[in-house]
């Protein structure tokens, strides 16, 4: 078989081989690059445990007796499949898979291994629609593919939403049961009672996400495996935080101001409110994350304003006001707004905002304006 594998070692497509026991016995460099697993990490693993493939509609495809191996045992040519595999980082990867069976040798019937070639499908957006849209910026919100929102008595329980939020923040990554116990029931006196509470919370979350679910083991989203829970990243789950951060990153790299504004505006629309706004009393919430995402949001609004000042001063003023509505002591936004009003000849409004800023700094921070702010306000006051 090694001679066969050599044929696929340097192909541009990802290629891997599975033996009759469904274990990975070959993994080429392109597969390493595409799926993130090194040859050492992949070899010897059962394919269905490693790849966790699902159909584009989210149905589990990879398992111990998958459709591919059923076809091989019947002596049929394996069909092509469009599937979603899980990348090592937990993200979803839409791929086309074509497979070629090989016999152990010329005199032995059946197959000794099957080589699968994998090629990424493009564009991703046309390949799969999110089956769950999870929003963590603002109160936790989940929307299903049919547009219905997850709600109900079970969903309103804080522990249920906290569990969902934590697993979403670690999308596709196994989280140990003990870790969840300490997170949701810190300092619990009884391990058995805490474990029972966790099992109930898992059940309630599964029922909230999938009301028609018959058995927990059949869940498409919340998986339990080897003492760990995880949200299946290849099940078509969309999460707002990486989209938010990626859009801002693209905007900062964009040379065209109009395109940069579009990226920033998309990011600000994703920000429905403060991070995990309904879970601030839980250990899932983090002050550092709260301030980080709030700062990204406010700096994006300021960037929209700064980029719009020449072409659309009305939009610029609206963006500055939006910043100050969220953080009324933000000196950088006040300075830019004061300068814009002054440049437009509206000295009275500029002076009024100088006074408001000084009041906000005193009331909220017990602080005086910075030297940069004093310089701007002095310039406005000195104009006759």
Image (cartoon, rainbow, N blue to C red):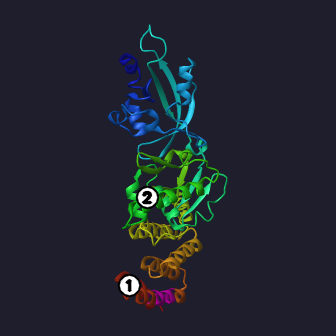
Q: Quadrant of residue 60?
A: top right
**At which x and y percent is residue 165?**
49, 60
- In the picture as drawn, the residue positioned furthest to the bottom comes out as 384
**Tag 1 secondary structure:** helix
- Residue at image position (54%, 78%) is 321
Q: Residue furthest top?
A: 107
Task: Return the residue nearer the eye: 174 or 295.
Answer: 174
Q: Observer-nearest residue: 206 or 164?
A: 206
For image coordinates 46% across by 56% down, the residue present is: 167
Q: Position of residue 248 (x, y in %)?
A: 47, 60
User: Which residue corresponds to the image point at 51% horizontal and 65% vertical from the top-left?
Assistant: 137
Q: Position of residue 43 (x, y in %)?
A: 36, 31
Q: Which mark is residue 195?
A: 2
Which part of the image, by quadrant, shows the N terminus? Answer: top left
Above or below residue 202? Residue 380 is below
Tell me, yes or no, whether the two marked residues, 2 and 1, touch with CB atoms within 8 Å.
no
Between the C-alphas of marks 2 and 1, the distance is: 61 Å
Identify the image quadrant of residue 288: bottom left
Q: Position of residue 34 (x, y in %)?
A: 43, 37
Q: Residue at x 47, y 78 (%)?
A: 327
Q: Main secondary structure of the magenta part?
A: helix
Instruction: Please provide the residue range marked out in magenta.
Output: 350-358
Q: Callout 2: few (<14), some (14-19), or many (20+) C-alpha neighbours within 10 Å? A: some
* Residue 375 numbered tag: 1
The image quarter containing residue 79 is top right
* Disc 2 element: helix
């Amino acid at each position: 078989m090694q001679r066969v594998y050599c044929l696929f070692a340097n192909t541009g497509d990802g290629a891997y081989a599975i033996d009759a026991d469904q274990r990975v016995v070959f993994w080429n460099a392109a597969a390493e690059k595409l799926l993130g697993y090194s040859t050492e990490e992949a070899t010897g693993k059962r394919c269905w445990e490693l790849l966790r493939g699902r159909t584009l509609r989210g149905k589990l495809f990879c398992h111990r007796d998958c459709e591919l191996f059923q076809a091989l045992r019947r002596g049929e040519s394996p069909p092509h499949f469009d599937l979603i595999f899980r990348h090592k980082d937990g993200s979803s990867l839409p791929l086309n898979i074509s497979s070629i069976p090989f016999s152990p040798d010329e005199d032995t019937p059946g197959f000794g291994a099957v080589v699968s070639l994998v090629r990424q499908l493009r564009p991703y957006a046309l390949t799969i629609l999110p089956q769950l849209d999870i929003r963590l910026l603002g109160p936790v919100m989940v929307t299903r593919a049919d547009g219905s929102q997850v709600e109900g008595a079970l969903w309103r329980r804080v522990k249920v939403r906290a569990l969902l939020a934590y697993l979403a923040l670690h999308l596709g990554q196994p989280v140990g049961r003990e870790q969840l116990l300490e997170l949701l029931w810190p300092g619990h006196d009884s391990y058995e009672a805490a474990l029972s509470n966790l099992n109930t919370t898992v059940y309630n979350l599964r029922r909230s996400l999938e009301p028609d679910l018959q058995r927990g083991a059949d869940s498409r989203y919340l998986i339990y495996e080897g003492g760990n829970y995880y949200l299946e990243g290849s099940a078509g789950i969309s999460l707002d935080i990486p989209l938010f951060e990626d859009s801002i990153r693209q905007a900062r790299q964009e040379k065209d101001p109009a395109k940069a504004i579009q990226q920033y505006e998309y990011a600000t629309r994703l920000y429905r409110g403060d991070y995990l706004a309904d879970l601030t009393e839980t250990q899932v919430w983090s002050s550092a994350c709260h301030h980080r995402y709030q700062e990204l949001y406010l700096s994006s609004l300021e960037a929209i304003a700064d980029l719009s000042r020449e072409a659309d001063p009305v939009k610029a003023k609206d963006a500055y006001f939006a910043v100050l509505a969220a953080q009324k002591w933000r000196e950088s936004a006040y300075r830019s707004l004061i300068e814009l009003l002054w440049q437009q000849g509206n000295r009275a409004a500029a002076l009024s905002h100088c006074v408001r800023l000084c009041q906000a700094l005193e009331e909220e921070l017990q602080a005086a304006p910075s030297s940069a702010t004093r310089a701007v306000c002095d310039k406005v006051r000195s104009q006759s």
